[in-house]
Image (cartoon, helix red, strand yellow):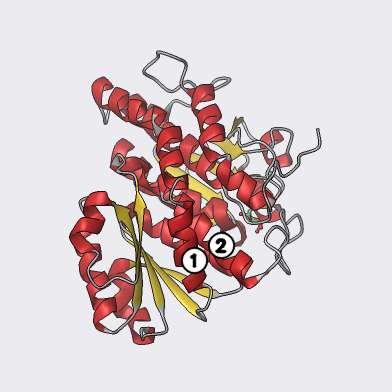
Amino acid sequence: ARVDKAGHKHFMAKEIAEQPQVIGEALNHYLPAGGAEVVLPGNGIDFSRIERLTMVACGTAFYACLTAKYWFEQLARLPVEVDIASEFRYREPPITPGTLALFVSQSGETADTLAALRFCEGKAAQIVSVINVPESSIARESDLALPIHAGVEIGVASTKAFTCQLTVLLMLALKAAADRGTLDADEIADHLAAMRGLPQALNGALDQNDEIRAAAQRLSEARDVLFLGRGQMYPLALEGALKLKEISYIHAEGYASGELKHGPIALIDKHMPVVVMAPRDDLFDKTVSNMQEVMARKGKVVLVSDESGIAEAHEGTFATVRMPAVHPLLAPIVYAVPAQLLAYHAAVAKGTDVDQPRNLAKSVTVE
Ligand code: G6P
């Protein structure tokens, strides 16, 4: 079937707006109604037999893996390695028989990711992929392929595939926690119940579109933008910077808040917007103190937080973006929306070709 823009100006806008619905689809496929456990297709995965997890991907899918590392380690106490496919394939990393090799790819056709998968054949305990296209090469060559159910994604800058990848990876981490007995049944049920609220939380994030557009218009005048996050929000800072550079051509970098002092602080002046992704979680106070270091040097802070975080720390910021209060595990998924919309509206303000940015391809099938 032909996919149209359904009244949106760009496919990217449509795909951002679709996220509550497609995440709902992904949840329905892995969480049977009324059940309190994650159900995988086919023979599934028995994580109690896995000793370590190696995740490999490119681009936005790589940032989904980096986020998931926090979840697998924290929830399932599983050692995790994450690598970019083009590095992994030539590094010849030792793969022990207890390793689960997990490949994440929207298209399922990225040449480097496919080559990394082939390198693991016959070495890993099991080869699993998280893909959007079930007929793809990566899906076909995996022992188990887990579809993300995002539907066709046309915008070159990945949006709904990213949040659907995160949703499936978080469900997998909870399955791993159940298999390994690192969380009890009640804790798992609580986390899964929170996940069922994702579509509503995503709608709450999308409701802030006007506020985000206003902040983005100011970002669009910058030459460089820095994105900061801590813990599981760090990979999202990387993804926010990637989105902005891909479609608006503004130079952007993502940094772990705690690394600010080790380099990027040298760049801060009144021309430098700094987007801070900071839900009010256990690390909030530390991130706020990094943000104050930025403001003390006249950097222009865009604080993305929830009601209580903004009430606590808005003073001296350049702009704020209010997110719904969410379960801490879900924050990277919900805060992906402002990361995407900031890039989108900055690109629209600059008049770039949002859906077909220069020099980029949707799927990189050559090395
Ligand atoms: C290209 C696309 C990105 C995507 C990356 C990985 O660079 O422009 O949006 O994240 O490839 O693609 P994959 O299909 O493997 O997820």
Does any portion of residue 239 appear in the rendered image? no
**Residue 137's spot in the image, x, y percent?**
73, 40
**Residue 158's spot in the image, x, y percent?**
61, 52
To which residue does mark 2 refer?
345
Q: Is mark 2 within 8 Å of ligand 1?
A: no
- Front-most of 8 and 190? 8
Say which quadrant the C terminus sits in: bottom right
As shown in the figure, which amino acid type bears the numbered disc 1?
A: Ala
Which numbered circle lies on residue 216?
Answer: 1
- Front-most of 267 and 307? 307
Q: Secondary structure at mark 2?
A: helix
348 in relation to 192, above or below: below
Residue occupying the point 47% across, 16% down: 32
Disc count in the image?
Answer: 2
Q: Secondary structure at mark 1?
A: helix
Residue occupying the point 62% across, 61% down: 86
- Front-most of 164 and 37? 164
Distance between the alpha carbons at the discs numbered 1 and 2: 6 Å
Give the residue at the far right of this rendering: 2
Q: Quadrant of residue 251?
A: bottom right
Is the residue marked by circle 2 packed among few (<14), some (14-19), or many (20+) residues within 10 Å? Answer: many
- Ligand 1 lies in quarter: bottom right
Residue occupying the point 30% across, 39% down: 327
As shown in the figure, which amino acid type bears the numbered disc 2?
A: His
Residue occupying the point 25% across, 71% down: 290
**Residue 353's spot in the image, x, y percent?**
71, 65
Give the residue at the far top of this rendering: 34
Say which quadrant the N terminus sits in: top right
Q: Quadrant of residue 357?
A: bottom right
